[in-house]
Image (cartoon, grey):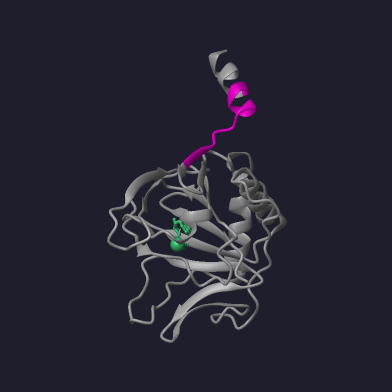
């Protein structure tokens, strides 16, 4: 009984928290479509598999990545860029599934950005121990569009820094179903992910999947 009452309140007023200037956290935003999202990730990975890319500095990334959409983010010994072709398969990246475009647009709207039309979705895979060091996302042409991020599977400690790499990051726990819209002054903040703790997720096992939706041009 108490649970039913709580659910109806949560539905009437979904959680929306401004965690930094221009950054809006939507707890549990994609829980209602979790199965569709996971199925769509499986279909993408069947076509363009996860791979650990090598940075221009010669380091292999700890995060395994793939993409969908018109363009995908890649790194190799020559640099970082968005490319319409998956270098692993020689074919275009898988199309962005309608359920992805739709959720990204609805989430961006909650963050105050109407008409968000991502042309790229980077799909990151974390396993226990995987981390992502502090960086800025600045390979896109237009920083007026937000980035929408979706967390699935094991929880992560997200590090949110400032405009300078040396700014001490704040830590946020992101769990399965959470969405964050990163716009305005937050768009160019340094950020990263602490080494993933081991655990078991009911739908994804010992993994965390993160989707980031981007407008690259
Ligand atoms: C803040 N991914 O793919 S998502 C990335 O959990 C990336 O896989 C992390 O950083 C992950 O580039 C973090 C949250 C996120 C994504 C993009 C941002 C936060 C951001 C861009 C600007 C500011
Ligand atoms: Fe990033």
> Which residue is at a point 61% across and 65% down the rendered structure image?
215
> Which residue is at a point 62% across and 67% down the rendered structure image?
68
Q: In this view, does 113 lie above or below 50?
A: above
Give x and y (percent) for residue 15: 54, 33
Dividing the image into 4 quarters, which one contains the C terminus? bottom right
Q: Is residue 9 magenta?
A: yes
- The one of 103 and 171 positioned closer to us in this rendering: 171
Residue 198 seen in render: no
Q: As drawn, is 151 to the left or to the right of 121?
A: left
Residue 134 seen in render: yes
Q: Is residue 110 above or below residue 71?
A: above
> Which residue is at a point 37% across and 71% down the rendered structure image?
61
Count of numbered marks: 0
Q: In this view, does 12 lie above or below 191?
A: above
Give x and y (percent) for residue 102: 70, 51
Q: Is residue 109 magenta?
A: no
Dividing the image into 4 quarters, which one contains the N terminus? top right
Q: What stretch is highlighted in magenta?
A: 8-18
- The one of 136 and 133 positioned closer to us in this rendering: 136
> Which residue is at a point 31% across and 52% down the rendered structure image?
169
The part of the image, by quadrant, that contains residue 96 is: bottom right
Give x and y (percent) for residue 57: 33, 81
Give x and y (percent) for residue 170: 33, 48
- The one of 117 and 44 positioned closer to us in this rendering: 117
For this orientation, the residue located farthest to the bottom is: 78
């Amino acid at each position: 009984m108490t649970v039913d009452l709580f659910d109806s309140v949560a539905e009437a007023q979904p959680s929306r928290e401004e965690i930094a200037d221009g950054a809006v956290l939507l707890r549990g935003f994609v829980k209602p479509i979790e199965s569709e999202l996971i199925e769509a990730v499986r279909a993408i990975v069947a076509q363009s598999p996860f791979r650990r890319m090598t940075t221009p500095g010669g380091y292999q990334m700890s995060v395994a990545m793939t993409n969908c959409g018109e363009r995908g983010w890649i790194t190799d010994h020559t640099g970082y860029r968005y490319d319409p072709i998956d270098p692993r398969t020689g074919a275009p990246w898988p199309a962005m599934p309608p359920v992805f475009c739709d959720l990204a647009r609805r989430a961006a709207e909650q963050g105050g950005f109407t008409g968000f039309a991502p042309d790229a979705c980077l799909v990151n895979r974390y396993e226990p121990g995987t981390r992502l060091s502090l960086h800025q996302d600045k390979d896109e042409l237009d920083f007026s569009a937000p980035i929408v991020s979706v967390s699935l599977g094991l929880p992560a400690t997200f590090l949110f820094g400032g405009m300078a790499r040396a700014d001490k990051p704040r830590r946020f726990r992101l769990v399965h179903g959470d969405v964050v819209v990163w716009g305005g002054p937050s768009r160019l903040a340094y950020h990263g992910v602490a080494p993933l703790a081991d655990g078991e997720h009911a739908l994804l096992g010992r993994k965390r999947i993160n989707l980031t939706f981007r407008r690259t041009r």
